[in-house]
Amino acid sequence: MNQKYFNGIGNYLRAEILYRLPEVNPFMDAREVIDNCPKVLELCTTIPRKAYSLGGGQLKDWENPWQSDKEKFERFIKCYNNKNMGHIMDKNGRRFWFDPKWNIQMLEYISKQK
């Protein structure tokens, strides 16, 4: 989640954007993803806009104080905090959610971090 590349993209948005790019290994370097899959930049606009239109990140310990349909937002979230998804703690102590089909790449990523 290098803010140089993903400024303003929070943890749940990271998970949702990468999940919606099934061909992209979520453990690739951000620059490599941008270079090889420019659609990621489009999703860095459309996914946050959609989340905003649904009331924002009504997750964990924050609830939107304005009248919004929480159920619509929950249906929008496909990856983040989904018990069927893979997850690890990133170097910033945040849980990184991803499609479990990338479990092998996750193990390679962890071994490189050590």
Image (cartoon, rainbow, N blue to C red):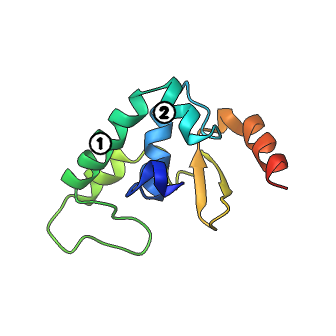
In the image, 91: left or right of 46?
right
In the image, 35: left or right of 52?
right
Identify residue for label 2: 34
Residue 25 in picture, x, y percent from top left: 62, 32
Nearer to us: label 2 or label 1:
2
Q: Is residue 17 above or below residue 95?
A: above
Q: Is residue 18 above or below residue 1?
A: above
For the N terminus, the image quarter is: bottom right
- Whether the residues at callouts 2 and 1 have beta carbons within 8 Å, the answer is no
Residue 11 in picture, x, y percent from top left: 48, 57
Outermost left residue:
67
SS for callout 2: helix
The residue lying at 33 percent from left, 33 percent from top is 42
Choose top left, top right, bottom left or bottom right for residue 31.
top right
Choose top left, top right, bottom left or bottom right for residue 107.
top right
Q: Earlier in the sequence, mark 2 or mark 1?
A: 2
